[in-house]
């Protein structure tokens, strides 16, 4: 019972990370904390979106494409 919360957390987190259900999403802000856009990472490609989820470009192999 002492480690009940830790066991529950790990039993949820580990399967999600193993099967790739979790992904890396980043919200981009300016210096005044206004939301400027989003970045989503999937299979080595980072896709960039504006604040209305319109695709603005992507980054692959260290190169940025608009």
Image: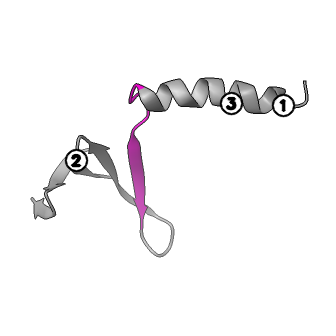
Task: From the image, tell me which residue sits under label 3.
Answer: 9
The residue depicted at 41 percent of the width and 52 percent of the height is 26
Magenta segment includes 27:
yes
Front residue of 39/8: it is 8
Tell me if mark 2 has few (under 14), some (14-19) or many (20+) residues whose alpha carbon lies within 10 angstroms of its own.
few
> What kind of element bears circle 3?
helix
Task: From the image, tell me which residue sits under label 2.
Answer: 44
Q: Looking at the figure, which quarter contains the N terminus?
A: top right
Image mark count:
3
Residue found farthest to the bottom: 31
Which segment did they paint magenta? 19-29
Q: Position of residue 2 (x, y in %)?
A: 90, 30
Task: From the image, tell me which residue sits under label 1.
Answer: 3
The residue depicted at 13 percent of the width and 57 percent of the height is 61
Above or below residue 37? Residue 34 is: below
Q: Quadrant of residue 53?
A: top left
Q: Position of residue 60 (x, y in %)?
A: 14, 54
* Numbered badge on residue 55: none
User: Sequence-wise, which precedes: disc 3 or disc 2?
Assistant: 3
Above or below residue 22? Residue 50 is: below
Q: Report how far apart the C-alphas of labels 2 and 1 lie in the structure.
A: 36 Å
Front residue of 54/26: it is 26
Comparing labels 1 and 3, the label whose residue is closer to the camera: 1
Residues at marks 2 and 1 touching, judged by CB atoms closer than 8 Å: no
Residue found farthest to the right: 2
Tell me if mark 1 has few (under 14), some (14-19) or many (20+) residues whose alpha carbon lies within 10 angstroms of its own.
few
Q: Position of residue 18 (x, y in %)?
A: 44, 29
Q: Along the horizontal axis of the image, is 29 left or right of 54?
A: right
């Amino acid at each position: 019972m002492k480690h009940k919360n830790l066991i529950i957390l790990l039993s949820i987190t580990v399967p999600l990370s193993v099967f790739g259900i979790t992904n890396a999403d980043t919200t981009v802000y300016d210096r005044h904390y206004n939301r400027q856009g989003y970045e989503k990472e999937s299979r080595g490609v980072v896709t960039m979106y504006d604040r209305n989820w319109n695709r603005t470009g992507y980054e692959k192999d260290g190169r940025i494409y608009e």
